[in-house]
Amino acid sequence: MNLDSLYQEVIMDHYKNPLHKKLSPEPTVQVHHVNTSCGDEVTLNLHMDGNLVSDISWEGSGCSISQASTSVMSDLLRGKDEDEALKIVADFLEMMQSKGTKSGDENILGDGVALAGVSKFPARVKCALLGWMAFKDAVTRSRSGE
Amino acid sequence: MLNVEKIKSDFPIFSRTIRDGKRLVYLDSGATSQKPRSVLDAERDFYEKHNAAVHRGAHQLAEEATDLYEGARDKVARFIGAESDEVVFTKNATESLNLLAYSWSNSSLTNKNLANSNLTNGNSIFALKPGDEILISEMEHHANLIPWQELAARTGATLKWFGITPEGRLNFDPSLITAKTKIVALTHQSNVLGTINPIADIAKIVKSHGALFVVDACQSIPHFAVNVKELGADFVAFSGHKALGPTGVGVLWGRRELLNEMSPFLTGGSMIETVTMERSTYASAPQRFEAGVPNMAQAVGLGAAIDYLSDIGMAKIAEHEHELTKYALTELQKIPGLAIVGPRDLENRGAVLSFTVEGIHPHDLGQVLDEYGIAVRTGYHCAWPLMRAMNVVATTRASFYIYNDTSDVDELVSGITRAQEFFKVSSSGVLR
């Protein structure tokens, strides 16, 4: 195991300067997710404009992996069509569950590919998924609210 | 200090390496301890030579198995200053505490339709009703919190708690103990802070109000001599696996006169006196609380663990851990940005050290330490309300035992320093 493969420069950049980490007012849906194994938390505000993910903002506390991953997600999925966003979430999930065998497509996952190394550390996969699962939950709720 | 090299040679796990050849620095005994060969041998020996269901059967194996199992009970009793029939074997301390909560829940049932059940023996000292109070503290492990939360919810009783001081000591307020208080449940030593609570002093006040006193001794009994009679509690719970013993065996000690008045928790074979198709009556303690074939090999393993601890001597173990804690407190606090979460003095303090490092989340710190073969616990340590009370989201915890020495502390300190370098945290805690 190599720490550098886990803590890539891109991850550390997102950790130090997280994107969209300030809750926008009047969201379509707000969700709060907790990683029950370590107590990391994220509150996510989702703004939908029809089928368009018009804004994702968040607040939270946690380790570098959970914070960086949520930052990557919030920047990557905003402006996407809902189905497209969920497809990207599915791709990210597949990479994270691959135990290090899938490196991810940068054209789809953007900075998210920097998190591929996390999939080799089973205890940390949940950290990387925290924000993404919150987003998925928010979309599901916004749909059922229609 | 103990001869740690000699002790380590008794623990097979220390002959393996971690993360590509690194020495195992095991600082997570607060979660579970490692096991000496004699414990593993005792379990294996039970299965290979004496395996049979205890308390059943007229054959030689059943006789030997029963002798070994009851012999383990005798060892536990001697170890904690109790009588053998006051020692109930459970799965772990969590089950011991739930046994109490569910037994007393059964005693609290008032539904007339339950008149045929011998579970509700109508003994009022265990029955809770609205207006009664259960008193715990903010520093409890979830295992000594949620069972009482749920018992209060089921019976209409009110859950109250002592707070904690900013240093992580119990903020003992005697005015919280009143005639309404039916149960007081406290930890002997915090699994996060290392704080040792003055149980014997508190017991006198609890007794003067006629309440039942339950003590979670998971973090104390494995580490220093505890005599349950001197402690003054009514019930004491601990786990075998934190005391060099196997997983799957825990202990509930209770005063004989109380145990024998209590409703059963789990029902079935072995715990009965007579059974008809209509109703049953129950055996006296400890059998009343040991339904089904118990974890026999594990209990025997716990007996071997107690022999191992007793051979070293609990006073020597306590002294060793005290010296180690003193050294660790001094060395850790030399690290810029490191803050101890819990008492910084050595008075009534066990060998559990929680801390935060400015600019590095505990999960990230644990990851780097693991890279160097150092096993610590990170997170909220099954004590979420305590973390809130201490104003931290999570901590890193190092906990020590007989196989640790100052070189392990040195490794920890150097690991933390390397983590600070890796994450480019300056001495002021700011990410560069």
Image: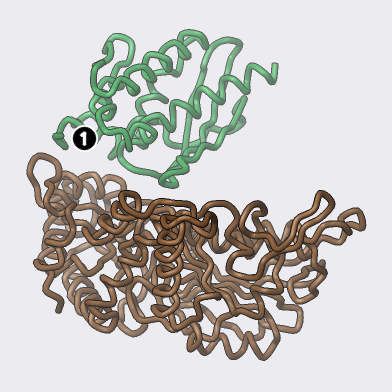
Chain colours: A green, B brown
Most extreme residue toward the right is B112
In percent of the image, x 31 and y 22: which residue is there?
A112
Compared with residue B170, is residue B301 higher up or lower down, i.e. above or below? above
Q: Nearer the viewer, residue B173 or B279?
A: B279
Q: Is residue A43 left or right of residue B240?
A: right
- The image shows residue A90 at horizontal and vertical percentages of 42, 15
- Which residue is labeled 1 in the image? A7
Total numbered labels placed on residues in the image: 1
Which residue: 52% across, 89% down? B201
Tell me the kind of residue under disc 1.
Tyr
Residue B279 falls in image quadrant: bottom right
Residue A100, given in percent of the width and then of the height, sits at 24, 22
Residue B99 horizontal/vertical position (percent): 61, 61
Quick one: SS at disc 1? loop
Q: Is residue A17 left or right of residue B114?
A: left
Quadrant location, the N terminus of chain B: bottom left
Judge by depth and name the residue closer to the eye, A20 or B53.
B53
Residue pictured at 56% horizontal, 25% vertical? A138
Up/down of A6 relative to B13, above or below = above
Task: Left or right? Give the position of B304 relative to B198.
Answer: left
**Residue B254 in sight in this render:** yes
Residue B133, image x, y percentages: 72, 72
Q: Which one is in front, B134 or B234?
A: B234
Using the rendered image of the protein, determine whether residue B142 is visible from the camera's viewpoint.
no
Is residue B196 or residue B104 the one in the foreground?
B104
Answer few, some or many: residues within 10 Å of disc 1's Cα (few below 14, many 20 plus, some between 14 and 19).
Answer: some
Where B274 sits versus B85, above or below? above
